[in-house]
Image: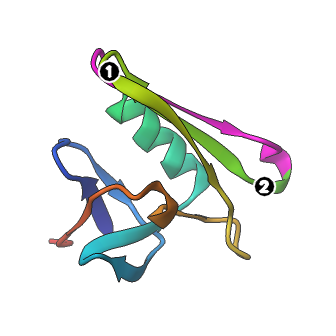
């Protein structure tokens, strides 16, 4: 199961999708995939980072998102019971990508 961020080129692996948010995909990812997504999507125009509060026990992560022309926003991502991170709290536009 894969997804992409609207307006970006990378695709990422979801462990599952939650109920859609406003018609958009609501991916749930591992901590490793969250880190990979943030590293890939950050660039000259977008400043993005993720900090895991206690990586050894799969606890919450703080995602910081901003840029030269945008206000910096921090979002707390709480892991589910399996230690994965639902991305719905970000309020971003995600599209599900067909597995082919």
Please give the name of the residue rendered at 73% of the width and 53% of the height, measured from the top-left corner.
60
Q: Is residue 28 above or below residue 35?
A: below
Q: Which residues are magenta?
A: 43-56
Residue 47 seen anywhere in this rendered image of the structure = no
The numbered mark, 1 or 2, whose residue comes first in the sequence reads 1
> Which mark is drawn over residue 59?
2
Give the residue number, with chain letter if any, for mark 1.
Answer: 43
Quarter holding residue 57:
bottom right
Residue at the outermost bottom position: 19
Q: Which mark is residue 23?
A: none
Q: Is residue 50 left or right of residue 90?
A: right
Q: Nearer the viewer, residue 72 or 84?
A: 72
Residue 73 lies left or right of residue 41; in this view the side is right
Q: Position of residue 14 (x, y in %)?
A: 42, 66
Q: From the viewer's side, name the closer residue of 100 and 85.
A: 85
Number of disc labels: 2
């Amino acid at each position: 199961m894969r997804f992409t961020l609207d307006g970006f080129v990378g695709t990422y692996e979801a462990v599952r999708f939650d109920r859609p948010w406003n018609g958009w995909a609501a991916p749930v990812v591992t901590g490793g995939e969250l880190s990979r997504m943030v590293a890939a999507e950050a660039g000259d125009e977008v400043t993005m980072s993720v900090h895991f509060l206690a990586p050894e026990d799969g606890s919450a992560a703080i995602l910081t998102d901003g840029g030269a022309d945008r206000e910096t926003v921090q979002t707390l991502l709480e892991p589910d019971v399996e230690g994965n991170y639902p991305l719905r709290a970000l309020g971003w536009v995600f599209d599900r990508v067909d597995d082919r």
